[in-house]
Amino acid sequence: MDRVLVVILLAGLGLRLVDIGAPLIDQQAWRQTDTAAIARNYLEEGLDRPFYPRVDWRGDTLGYVEMNFPLFPYSVALLYAAAGGVHEWLGRLLAALLSTASAGILYLLCRRTFEDIGVARVAAALYLVVPVSWFFGRAFMPEALMMLLSLASLYTFDRWLRSGRWADFAVAVACAAACFLVKIPTLYLGFPLVAMAWRARGLAFIRDPRMWLYLIAVLAPAAAWYAHAANLFHETGLTFGIWNHHGYDKWDSSLLLTGDFYAVMAARFAHNILTPIVTLLTLVGTVLTVRHARDDSGRSLYLLVWGAGLGLYLVLVPEGNHKLHYYQLPFVPVCAMLAAKGLMTWSRRCGALWGQRLVVVTCVATVAYSGWVVHGYYRPDNNVYHYHRSAREAGSLFDSRADADAVVVTGEIDDNAGAPHRSQNPTLLYYANRKGWQITPEEFQEETLSALQQRGADLFIAAAGFVRPHAEFWNTCLRRGVSTAAMTAWAHTDADYLALTRREHGPSRHFVVVRLAAD
């Protein structure tokens, strides 16, 4: 056991455990609450149906949704069951443990690639502390599981190539199959996997029946699941837009013709994804790896092919990468390995003492810079964090006052670029602990409420700041009867509503509840 690695892993886990009990109101709150809602619904509506994930924004359907294989939320649901109830910190803890374990596998993969324990240690450390890995390594999302399975797929495949044992083959198949199930975009791993096979067997790998058996075995479960998931969509009309048949256009290639796309991505990699120091070291490590590719018998060739595959992923999914920071998380392990190579090469040229100091200073500086960046993820700007904090308080109060079987319509701003067949923002539904619909301010009309009332909706809840500026819609709400999230009294005039808010305290008074049962 490498004691230095143990210290690195414990330190990385410690960073992820900071504020582990924080509510799901930080960066990507909508994505985190969506995942948490599925976990909660498993617990409350049946752990015996793992292949039927359910969302809150189900309307009058059963709530089954087309999505990637829900291994992460189902695992959290099992933890909920063991703990006797919903505890969101368990989802964060699971992500933190998976992310930390990923660094351990990266260490093994890097040590085998460069045959250098120093490079492997630094790679694991950098992987754990760069901003995007630090934050999304403790977010209530499946990304940490995706990264663990991605690295395990490469490591176990390489181990099977070296040993040729059927037991190793089975483990390699299991890791890759689970990886493609959990996140279908991880098919970009085909690039480094082919590079590994080519180095080990030459072009003869194409004629090896075991390679074809591996290919079929790892893709068949994913094909079966996504066919099943498509059937769920046909049953309920609910989807996460996996294949872009329904959803915002992640593949919008028009972005590639704009300078803004490249400027944004370059700035993000240098700031949010890798930090300036690790970005520079990655470039140095890439140059060194290219120069020495022949010297190490091609062991590091797959790193360059892996990076090229990720580059292709970046340009094939430009809108998704442009919009969402966690889409760049797959770049972190290969960049960490290359950066570690660059740093250790430099440090050894400085001599033992000064080289060690250089490594320590670099890691400390990276942690400091990353901490500054991650703080912005914990407390997002542009009033988003404060809104979600208020929505959580209002939703919790509403949950304690509304009928348990009430069907709810929430009004929230669009976080999903108008994607059809899915919620634009499921956060308030999650906080209110109810099922129903979510509409955006563009849909605030009498006809919308009446139509949803006919389909079974009982109450409408939204921030007053979203509702009151729509004068005609606000008058419609007043005719029906409005209250705050506390629902202590009902008002039918604006003056009565304002008087009601003055009698209450806390953020919940800034949310409007409308009765849909009475005109």
Image (spheres, rainbow, N blue to C red):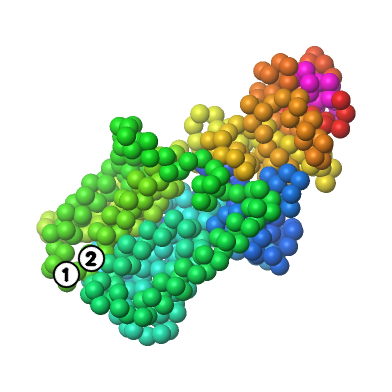
Q: Which residue occupies 39% across, 65% down?
A: 151
The vertical placement of 197 against 409, above or below, is below
Name the element at disc 2: loop
Query: Residue 49: where, in percent of width, then height?
Result: 69, 65
Instruction: Give the residue pinned by disc 2.
Output: 300
Q: Amino acid at mark 2?
A: Ser
Mark identifier at residue 36: none
Boundaries of the magenta span = 474-491
**How many marks overall?**
2
Q: Is residue 131 left or right of residue 401?
A: left
Q: Amino acid at mark 1?
A: Asp
Task: Mark yes or no: residue 207 visible.
Answer: yes
| Foreground pick, 150 / 207 | 207
Q: Which residue occupies 76% across, 30% down?
A: 449
| Foreground pick, 487 / 258 | 258
Q: Which residue occupies 32% across, 62% down?
A: 191
Callout 2–callout 1 Cβ contact below 8 Å: yes
Q: Is residue 252 left or right of residue 461?
A: left
The vertical placement of 223 against 375, above or below, is below
The answer to if 93 sits in the magenta stretch is no
Q: Is residue 68 left or right of residue 343?
A: right
Query: Residue 394: where, in percent of width, then height?
Result: 71, 35
- In this view, the residue farthest toward the top is 495
For the residues labelled 2 and 1, the Cα–Cα distance comes to 7 Å
Query: Residue 407: where, in percent of width, then height?
Result: 79, 42
Q: Is residue 400 left or right of residue 349?
A: right
Mark identifier at residue 296: 1
